[in-house]
Image (cartoon, grey):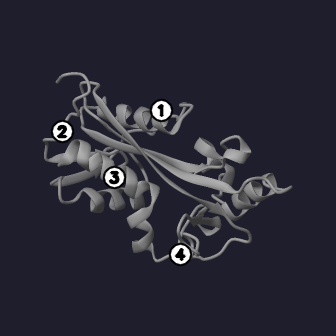
Amino acid sequence: MPDGTPRRFTGDALVIASHNAGKVREFADLLGPYVRSFTSAGQLGLPEPEETGTSFVENAELKARATAAAGHVALSDDSGLVVPALGGDPGIYSARWAGPSKDFAMAMRKVEEGLAGGKDRRAYFVCALSLAWPDGHVETVEGRCWGTLVWPPRGEKGFGYDAMFKPDGHDITFGEMDPVKKHEMSHRADAFRQLVDRCFK
């Protein structure tokens, strides 16, 4: 295809480059109208590559390429919270800030401690999605959702940093918001809309 022309997904089966069963189900729900069958890298026994990229896009592409190299069209994501006043942290290390026990209450406290002294509380969530083919071709999009960080955290409906993130135009946090409503406006929803328009419609 000419440079700049998106490649369309024309197959029946897609591999989600993840070992996270919840993520696999969510992706399958979002792309169900366009793909006949789904499996995951975990179900195929493929190893998880080390995330050595320096950006969300690089890590998403790294994971998608690793699975595609085994002969599959593969989809991967990388996502996290970016706080400009913290130099972009936690960024690509959003999950690592929660430690091996995935203690996001601790991670949110670290963010709040970093904002001490009246620093700007603006922040945004990022989701990079990469679709990779076995021949090495990759299509990547990046979705964002801007908001303001609140303290103390509010709500238990979300996960990760949701309880301290109040999206623009709303008075409640993602942690207080109905999940269906959140999914309509989140960074992941933004990225999937872009990917569907680019590769699946």
Q: Does dot 2 land on a helix, a strand or a loop?
A: loop
In the image, is 107 to the left or to the right of 91?
A: right
**Residue 45 in the image, given as x and y percentages of width and height:** 35, 43
User: Nearer the observer, disc 4 or disc 2?
Assistant: 2
The numbered mark, 4 or 3, whose residue comes first in the sequence reads: 4
The numbered mark, 4 or 2, whose residue comes first in the sequence reads: 2
Q: Are marks 4 and 3 in contact (CB under 8 Å)?
A: no
The numbered mark, 3 or 2, whose residue comes first in the sequence reads: 2
In space, the residues marked 4 and 3 are separated at their CA atoms by 22 Å
> Where is residue 32, by image quadrant?
bottom left
In space, the residues marked 3 and 2 are separated at their CA atoms by 14 Å
In space, the residues marked 1 and 2 are separated at their CA atoms by 21 Å
Residue that numbered label 3 is attached to = 192
Residue that numbered label 1 is attached to = 58
Which of the two residues, 85 or 41, is positioned nearer the viewer here? 85
Residue that numbered label 2 is attached to = 8
Which of the two residues, 15 or 166, is positioned nearer the viewer here? 166
The numbered mark, 1 or 2, whose residue comes first in the sequence reads: 2
Residue that numbered label 4 is attached to = 157
Residue located at (32% from left, 48% from top)? 194
